[in-house]
Image: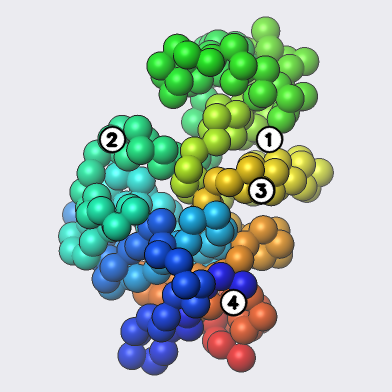
Amino acid sequence: MTGAGVVEAGGAMQGAGSGHPPLLEVIDLSAGYGPYRALFGVSLAVVAGSALAVLGPNGAGKTTLARVITGLIRPTSGRILLDGEDVTGERAWRLARRALRHAPEGRSVFASLTVEENLLLQLGVAAGGAGTADALARAYELFPRLAGRRRQLAATLSGGEQRMLALAPVLARPPRLLVVDELSLGLAPVLLDQVYATLRGVREAGTTMIVIEQRVHHALDLADHIVVLDKGTVAFDGPAERLDLGTIGPTGGTARGS
């Protein structure tokens, strides 16, 4: 497995273990919202072509990490390197132009537009108008349920269907690096299995992924290596077989290496 190494008691990250330079490096990152601190000196690395699962209880800082990496929140300290270049504090739209995309938690759709209008709007912006028709066909191929509802208002879709509609434009034009936040929210088990199968196909086609998830086993099936956050710090960083799953709970707990 590819990994950034196990974090020792002092918090230092050991060798990358793959022999390849990382596509993304997060170095001693801290961030928060006003006076509230959510991340404290977080470091991790993701090698191109790999998938990293970021796990942890509610309030651990997972969504904040996703937002900082994708430029939605400026860190208070630390650095973010993309292909070895410092992109700390870069605006989200500039990172998106460098093929770093964010699929945020929640539904993120335009309720008053139809399914197809939502897709065309987002795909047209992402593609600059070029290749939009092909990307639309790909979105319907990935999520056939949406094809049957293309003229339906997004507001009338089920919660799971709205989540699929939010994901479809991102997966139809896979970026180089994709950050997916809480994919399981609002999805029935059968839809969740379908979406994770789609993610595996996108990854096999070459997209590097950071998957932030509460449903641990789905994330572990996709990921090469694991980072566990607990109270804004890295509690574990290493291969899945060294992770004690019993230490990750919905409200707290720190992962241990075995």
Relative height, residue 165 to residue 18 (above, below): above
Mark 3 and mark 1: Cα distance apart in space: 25 Å
Q: Are marks 3 and 1 in contact (CB under 8 Å)?
A: no
Task: Specify the quadrant that holds the C terminus.
Answer: bottom right
Could you tell me if residue 189 is visible in this image?
A: yes
Q: Nearer the viewer, mark 2 or mark 1?
A: 2
Disc assigned to residue 204: 3
Relative height, residue 69 to residue 107 (above, below): below
Residue 94 location (% of width, % of height): 28, 35
Q: Earlier in the sequence, mark 3 or mark 4?
A: 3
Q: Which residue is mark 1?
A: 160
Q: Is residue 18 left or right of residue 204?
A: left
Q: Earlier in the sequence, mark 2 or mark 4?
A: 2
Residue at the (59%, 34%) spot, across then down: 171
Mark 2 and mark 3: Cα distance apart in space: 26 Å
Q: Amino acid at mark 2?
A: Arg
The quadrant holding residue 35 is bottom left
